Image (spheres, rainbow, N blue to C red):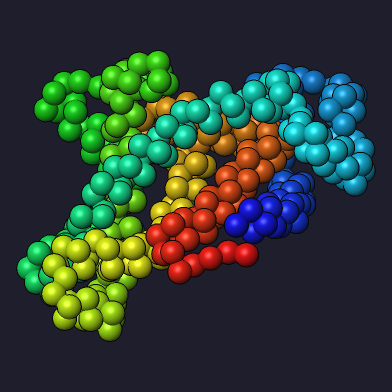
């Protein structure tokens, strides 16, 4: 197992290198000049000479290969560079927002799993029944309704029924759990509703297939209780593809809550993405993409390791 983990960690290097090359080149193809936005964005009459000096100061006049080499050298030192707009370290810019986004993603995952696992299991245990059809309609609604629209409905409901809105001040859950949950439970519910729909549908499909397997019939023929058949035999195997979906969805939530964060006025990574894009801040965008790519590959590794926990027959060497 240790050798497998080390091998997977080594394979992360070419994956992240490829992501670094792609994002670097893609951002240079996109039209826009941060110097123009920074100095002439408010309509100021700035001469071309001043603009050229600012480009030289930021290193934008150098060949792309030199800019890429400098950036990659910083990545090897775990240095993401400095934001071209705020001139603060990119790690600080991301770190100040990542905490909030992680809180929302983890809470949304918890909410989604709390809903999806019992709902998906019930739909599989009673296929083609009235309960199954009701659950399938509910999960289809979760897939069809965008998270930001659900967030707007939640805000309107809070205003209409309680004349109340959560405070926009973020406090980490380990400092003040009540204040943190009061603020983040609503976006977590909005995002977790769709999350639960995806997971529940996957769990239902895999559970229905697993319950038809020969070893399930054998367990029932031996007199094993239905509860034990489901929890000990069917559920671990049905959870294997479900865990994959959970991992993908969780990794997506880290940087994919752009509109939802705007709806709830949360100062997370989504809002930082919008700010960096509007300012053409290449360095900040590169750093955020690399952080999200790292979260993706680490999440995939954790999912693979969970396979061996759910199914002891799976061993990595």
Residue positioned 28% across, 68% down in the render: 233
Q: Is residue 76 visible?
A: yes
Q: Quadrant of the N terminus?
A: bottom right
Q: Residue at x 9, y 64 (%)?
A: 131
Q: Give how far across and how far down residue 113 sits, in percent.
A: 30, 49
Write the residue at 40% across / 20% down. 174
**Residue 205: x %, y % from top left:** 29, 71
Any part of residue 123 in sight: no
The answer to whether 105 appears left or right of 114 in the picture is right
Q: Is 132 above or below relative to 10?
A: below
Task: Return the residue nearer the eye: 215 or 262.
Answer: 215
Q: In the rendered image, which quarter is residue 177 located in? A: top left
| Along the line of sight, the residue nearer the viewer: 158 or 246 | 246
Q: Is residue 305 above or below residue 105?
A: below
Percent x, y of residue 282: 72, 37
Question: Measured along the vertical axis of the image, is residue 256 above or below residue 173?
Answer: below
The residue lying at 40 percent from left, 35 percent from top is 104
Residue at the limit of the structure toward the bottom, as seen here: 214
Q: Quadrant of the C terminus?
A: bottom right
């Amino acid at each position: 197992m240790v050798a497998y983990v080390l091998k997977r960690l080594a394979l992360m290097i070419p994956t992240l290198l490829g992501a670094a090359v792609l994002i670097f080149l893609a951002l240079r193809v996109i039209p826009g000049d941060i110097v123009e936005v920074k100095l002439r964005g408010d309509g100021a009459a700035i001469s071309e000479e001043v603009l050229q000096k600012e480009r030289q100061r930021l290193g934008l006049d150098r060949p792309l290969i030199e800019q890429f080499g400098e950036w990659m050298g910083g990545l090897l030192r775990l240095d993401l560079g400095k934001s071209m707009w705020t001139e603060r370290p990119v790690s600080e810019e991301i770190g100040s927002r990542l905490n909030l986004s992680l809180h929302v993603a983890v809470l949304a995952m918890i909410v989604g799993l709390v809903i999806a696992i019992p709902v998906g299991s019930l739909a599989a245990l009673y296929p083609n029944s009235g309960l199954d059809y009701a659950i399938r309609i509910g999960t289809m609604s979760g897939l069809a309704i965008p998270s930001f629209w659900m967030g707007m409905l939640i805000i309107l409901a809070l205003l209409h029924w309680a004349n109340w809105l959560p405070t926009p001040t973020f406090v980490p859950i380990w400092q003040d759990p009540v204040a943190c949950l009061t603020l983040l439970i609503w976006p977590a519910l909005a995002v977790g509703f769709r999350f639960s729909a995806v997971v529940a549908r996957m769990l239902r499909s895999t559970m229905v297939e697993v319950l038809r397997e020969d070893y399930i019939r054998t367990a029932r023929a031996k007199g094993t209780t239905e509860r034990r058949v489901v929890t000990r035999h069917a559920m671990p195997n049905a959870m294997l593809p479900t865990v994959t979906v959970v991992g993908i969805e969780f990794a997506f939530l880290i940087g994919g809550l752009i509109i939802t964060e705007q709806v709830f006025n949360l100062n997370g990574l989504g809002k930082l993405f919008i700010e960096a894009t509007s300012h053409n801040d290449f360095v900040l965008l590169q750093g955020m993409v690399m952080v999200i790519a790292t979260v993706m590959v680490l999440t995939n590794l954790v999912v693979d390791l969970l396979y061996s926990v759910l199914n002891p027959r799976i061993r990595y060497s």
